[in-house]
Image (cartoon, rainbow, N blue to C red):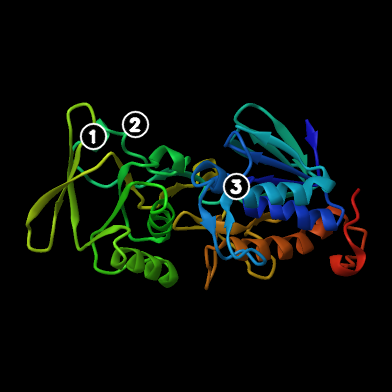
C-alpha cells in the first residue's frame, strides 16, 4: 500500500501544478494516471502544439510545458502510478480514503483530487464514407509527430482551436495544407482565426469554408477527399493525409459511479475551494463545472491553488494554515 497525504487522479498540467501548491504546504502527493506517461492530453495528443496563454511564455510547446512543470515539482518528490485507471474509492473510518486502481494498486490518502481533464476520452469522428478504411496510416485524429507530415499534402477538417492552431503550425511543415470547415466562421480564438485568414490570403494554405465532407477515395492508399459546397456541387481534392480535428468525446468512466454530482460529464464543485459534494474529494481542471467555467490550463492552476488551501485542514487538522509567499520565503522542501 502507498501512503500519502493527497492522491491526485490525473497527471496532466493541472494535476502537476497541484503537486507544487501542495508541496508549499508540506503535503505529499501521489498521482495516478491511465496514460503511460505524465502530461495528460498535452503529452498524449499534441506534444508539439504551441500554447499561447501560459503567463510568462509568449509561446510554449505543450511537452516543454510539462517538462518544466516536472522540473518545478521535483523538489517535492511526488510519486506516480502510471498506466493504471482508478476504479474505486473506499472511505475509511477516520475519513481518509483508499484509492484502488485497475491493477490492484492501493493508495491511502487523506484527500482525493480529481484532475482527470476530460476523463477517459476518444476523438469525435466525422460521418464520412470509407473513413475506417484509412484510419491508422492515413487518417489521424491527433498530431503526435508533425514531422510525419513534412513535405506532404494534408487536409485538416474542423473549426475549433485545435484545427486552427495545427493549420498555422503545419503551414511551415507540410508541402500543402488545406483547412476545410462546414461553416463560414470559426469557433476558435479570434487571433488564431485571423492567422488562418492571413495565411490563406498570402497563398500559404488553402481555405475551404462552407464545405461538407462526403467521403474518402483511394485503393489501399488514400488519394482524395470528396466535398460538397452550399450549392450541393461536388469536388474531390487530392491529399496524402487527412486530419479531422473535432475535439474529444469525454467519458467519466468509473468516476461516474462514485456518488458525485455530475452535470453533462463534468463534476459540479463549490468555487470557494473546488470541493465536490463528498467531503475530502475535490475536482480541478477541465473535469469540473461551475457557473462561468472556462476550460483553460491557467484556470485549472488557480483552482489547484485554492483547493490545496482547503485540503490542508484534512492533512494537518491540528495546525493553523499560515501561507507564505514564495517570493519572500523561496521553496522549502520536505
Name which of mark 3 and mark 2 comes first in the sequence. Answer: 3
* Residue tagged 1: 222
Could you tell me if residue 110 is visible in this image?
Answer: no
Q: Residue at x 54, y 68 (%)?
A: 290
Front residue of 62/199: it is 199
* Residue tagged 3: 63
Label 1 sits on a secondary structure element that is: loop
Front residue of 34/220: it is 220
Q: Quadrant of residue 24?
A: bottom right
Q: Quadrant of the N terminus?
A: top right
Task: Please give the label number shown on residue 240.
Answer: none
Label 3 sits on a secondary structure element that is: helix
Cα gap from disc 3 to disc 2, whole angstroms: 24 Å
Q: Quadrant of residue 4?
A: top right
Q: Is residue 232 above or below residue 28?
A: below
The answer to whether 236 appears left or right of 139 in the picture is: left
Crowdedness near tag 3: few (<14), some (14–19) or many (≥20) residues, C-alpha within 10 Å: many
Crowdedness near tag 1: few (<14), some (14–19) or many (≥20) residues, C-alpha within 10 Å: many
Q: Point out residue 257 in the picture as x, y percentages from the top left corner.
A: 53, 44
Q: Is residue 267 above or below residue 109?
A: below
Cα gap from disc 1 to disc 3, whole angstroms: 30 Å
Q: Point out residue 255 in the picture as x, y percentages from the top left corner.
A: 55, 45
Label 2 sits on a secondary structure element that is: loop
Could you tell me if residue 320 is visible in this image?
Answer: yes
Q: Are marks 1 and 3 in contact (CB under 8 Å)?
A: no
* Residue tagged 2: 137
Q: Are marks 1 and 2 in contact (CB under 8 Å)?
A: yes
Front residue of 133/225: it is 225
Q: Residue at x 50, y 52 (%)?
A: 49
The answer to whether 54 appears left or right of 233 in the picture is: right
Name which of mark 1 and mark 3 comes first in the sequence. Answer: 3
Amino acid at each position: 500500500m502507498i501512503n500519502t497525504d493527497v492522491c491526485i487522479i490525473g497527471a496532466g498540467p493541472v494535476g502537476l501544478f497541484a503537486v507544487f501548491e501542495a508541496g508549499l504546504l508540506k503535503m505529499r502527493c501521489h498521482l495516478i494516471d491511465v496514460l503511460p506517461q505524465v502530461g495528460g492530453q498535452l503529452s498524449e495528443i499534441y506534444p508539439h502544439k504551441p500554447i499561447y496563454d501560459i503567463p510568462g511564455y509568449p509561446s510554449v510547446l505543450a511537452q516543454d510545458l510539462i517538462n518544466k512543470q516536472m522540473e518545478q515539482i521535483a523538489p517535492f518528490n511526488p510519486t506516480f502510478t502510471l498506466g493504471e485507471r482508478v476504479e474505486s474509492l473506499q472511505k475509511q473510518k477516520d475519513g481518509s480514503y483508499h484509492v484502488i486502481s485497475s491493477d490492484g494498486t492501493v493508495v491511502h490518502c487523506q484527500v482525493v483530487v480529481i484532475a482527470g481533464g476530460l476523463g477517459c476520452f476518444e476523438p469525435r469522428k466525422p460521418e464520412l464514407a470509407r473513413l475506417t478504411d484509412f484510419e491508422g496510416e492515413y487518417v489521424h485524429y491527433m498530431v503526435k509527430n508533425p514531422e510525419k507530415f513534412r513535405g506532404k499534402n494534408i487536409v485538416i477538417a474542423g473549426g475549433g482551436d485545435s484545427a486552427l492552431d495545427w493549420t498555422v503550425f503545419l503551414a511551415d511543415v507540410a508541402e500543402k495544407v488545406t483547412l476545410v470547415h462546414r461553416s463560414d466562421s470559426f469557433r476558435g480564438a479570434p487571433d488564431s482565426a485571423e492567422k488562418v485568414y492571413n495565411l490563406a490570403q498570402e497563398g500559404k494554405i488553402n481555405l475551404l469554408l462552407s464545405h461538407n465532407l462526403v467521403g474518402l477515395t483511394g485503393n489501399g492508399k488514400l488519394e482524395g477527399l470528396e466535398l460538397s459546397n452550399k450549392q450541393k456541387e461536388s469536388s474531390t481534392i487530392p491529399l496524402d493525409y487527412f486530419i479531422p480535428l473535432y475535439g474529444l468525446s469525454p467519458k467519466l468512466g468509473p468516476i461516474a459511479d462514485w456518488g458525485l454530482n455530475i452535470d453533462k460529464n463534468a463534476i459540479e464543485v463549490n468555487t470557494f475551494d473546488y470541493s465536490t459534494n463528498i467531503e475530502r474529494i475535490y475536482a480541478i481542471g477541465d473535469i469540473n463545472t461551475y457557473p462561468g467555467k472556462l476550460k483553460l490550463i491557467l484556470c485549472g492552476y488557480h483552482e489547484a491553488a485554492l483547493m490545496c488551501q482547503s485540503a490542508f485542514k484534512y492533512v494537518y487538522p491540528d495546525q493553523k494554515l499560515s501561507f507564505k509567499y514564495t517570493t519572500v520565503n523561496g521553496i522549502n522542501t520536505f
